[in-house]
């Protein structure tokens, strides 16, 4: 068994934040039934790159799910969903606030059909507040949430994080909220609403930038790959590329200086403590640049690791997916898609000893599970379902 086996989720999400949330829950064993538009499906089915006719983007974040297609603008389709609700544990949606209510599928309606239902919403700004109706995309939220203001080489070049972390973190926090609500229901029988905002999620991950602002009264600015309070904690050129070094305390600094043949730096008052190294970074940085330019990335990594100095390369994606540690931890998995064939994607980062998430089914073909799901959860006959198809309802 998997950890969430027996949990049934009706998934109205699309594109990234919501589908990432429900994929994590599906990896852990929940049965996730993805509700999509007839003929078109999730918007991300039309995002490249493609394997034949199938979107690699879609396949990479919708594994382990089922797909049904119903036209929620049709009252008959809404009634079908309502028939399914008593058998569901969780509903997840990431529409703009108010859309589900207009469809007649808001939390206040559905909890009357199933008082124990967990109703989770992931949206740009949440269901309350002056921004709640604004449209939201990852780039917009990375900017509004502050992460771009502390990312990049300097204050003149605010930079977004390379992956869509506003979506990813919202999806992750939404999954955590659902698990917390399920635990509460286990104790009380009571369902509840989970409201997760991309903006809230971005503020939550600002880490010590917020602390630095409240202590100093000044907004932190981008400082490249340096750490604002640890030194040296930065990227350096080598003879053939780059290396990251993280000297997290003075003991590591001593080992580093001995390794590179510069023990006098340990006794130098400008560099003897972490605080001093931070204050005198402008003087220390050129010394370290000169030192690190004398060997290759691989050469430095071998020597530094032997001395227990934290370090690492800057891997490109090809290097990441072929890294022996990544492979050992099964973080690249292969599934057999019925249309696209064999397809590789990131695995599940949650390693559970008793209920491992190690077997994956491919993302569903659009509407592939309509009949089996409606028979099981809506009590419909194949003839009724065929009639819905003819009428464009499902």
Image (tube, grey):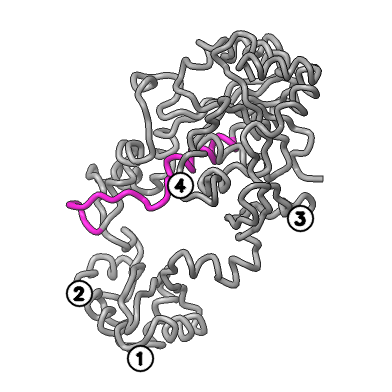
Residue under numbered circle 4: 48
Q: Disc 3 on helix, strand or loop? A: loop
Question: Do residues under tags 2 and 4 come within 8 Å of each other at their CB atoms?
Answer: no
Q: Disc 4 on helix, strand or loop? A: loop
Q: Nearer the viewer, residue 379 or 31?
A: 379
Q: Residue at x 53, y 26 (%)?
A: 121
Mark 1 or mark 4, which is nearer to you?
4
Residue at the left extreme? Answer: 156
Q: Residue at x 62, y 21 (%)?
A: 70
- Which mark, residue 269? none
- Which one is earlier in the sequence, the residue at label 2 or at label 3? 2
Mark 3 or mark 1, which is nearer to you?
3
- Which one is earlier in the sequence, the residue at label 3 or at label 1? 1
Image spot of residue 130 (x, y percent): 34, 19
347 relative position to 199: left or right:
right
- Which one is earlier in the sequence, the residue at label 4 or at label 3? 4
**Magenta span has 301?**
no
Residue under numbered circle 1: 261
Q: Residue at x 64, y 57 (%)?
A: 342
Distance between the Cα atoms at labels 3 and 1? 45 Å
Image quadrant containing the N terminus: top right
Image spot of residue 146 (x, y percent): 31, 41
Residue under numbered circle 2: 283
- Mark 1 burial class by Cα count in 10 Å: few <14, some 14-19, many 20+: few
Question: Do residues under tags 1 and 4 come within 8 Å of each other at their CB atoms?
Answer: no
């Amino acid at each position: 068994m998997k950890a969430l086996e027996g949990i049934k989720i009706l998934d109205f999400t699309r594109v990234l934040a919501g589908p990432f949330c429900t994929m994590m829950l599906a990896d852990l064993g929940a049965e996730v039934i993805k509700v999509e538009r007839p003929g078109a499906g999730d918007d991300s089915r039309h995002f490249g790159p493609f394997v034949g006719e199938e979107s690699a983007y879609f396949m990479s974040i919708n594994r382990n799910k089922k797909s049904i297609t119903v036209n929620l603008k049709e009252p008959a389709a809404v009634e079908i969903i309502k028939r399914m609700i008593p058998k569901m544990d969780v509903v997840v949606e990431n529409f703009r606030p108010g859309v589900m209510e207009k469809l007649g599928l808001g939390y206040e309606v559905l909890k009357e059909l199933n008082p124990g239902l967990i109703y989770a919403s992931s949206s740009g700004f949440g269901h309350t507040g002056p921004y709640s109706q604004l449209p939201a995309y990852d780039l917009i939220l990375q900017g509004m949430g502050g992460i771009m203001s502390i990312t990049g080489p300097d204050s003149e070049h605010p930079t977004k994080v390379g992956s869509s972390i506003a979506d990813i973190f919202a999806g992750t926090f939404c999954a955590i909220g659902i698990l917390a609500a399920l635990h509460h229901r286990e104790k009380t029988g009571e369902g509840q609403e989970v409201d997760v905002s991309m903006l809230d999620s971005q503020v939550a991950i600002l880490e010590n930038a917020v602390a630095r602002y409240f202590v100093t009264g000044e907004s932190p600015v981008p400082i490249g790959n340096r750490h604002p309070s640890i030194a040296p904690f930065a990227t350096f050129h080598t003879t053939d590329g780059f290396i990251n070094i993280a000297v997290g305390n003075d003991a590591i600094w001593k080992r580093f200086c001995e390794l590179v043949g510069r023990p006098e730096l340990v006794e130098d008052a400008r560099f003897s403590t972490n605080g001093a190294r931070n204050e005198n970074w402008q003087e220390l940085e050129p010394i370290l640049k000169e030192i690190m330019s004398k060997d290759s990335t691989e050469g430095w990594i071998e020597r530094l690791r032997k001395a227990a100095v934290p370090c690492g390369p800057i891997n490109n994606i090809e290097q990441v997916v072929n890294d022996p540690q990544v492979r050992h931890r099964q973080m690249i998995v292969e599934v057999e898609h019925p249309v696209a064939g064999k397809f590789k994607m990131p695995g599940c980062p949650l390693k559970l000893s008793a209920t491992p998430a190690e077997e994956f089914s491919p993302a569903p073909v659009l509407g592939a599970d309509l009949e089996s799901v409606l028979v099981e959860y809506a009590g419909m006959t194949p003839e009724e379902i065929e009639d819905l198809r003819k009428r464009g309802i499902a």
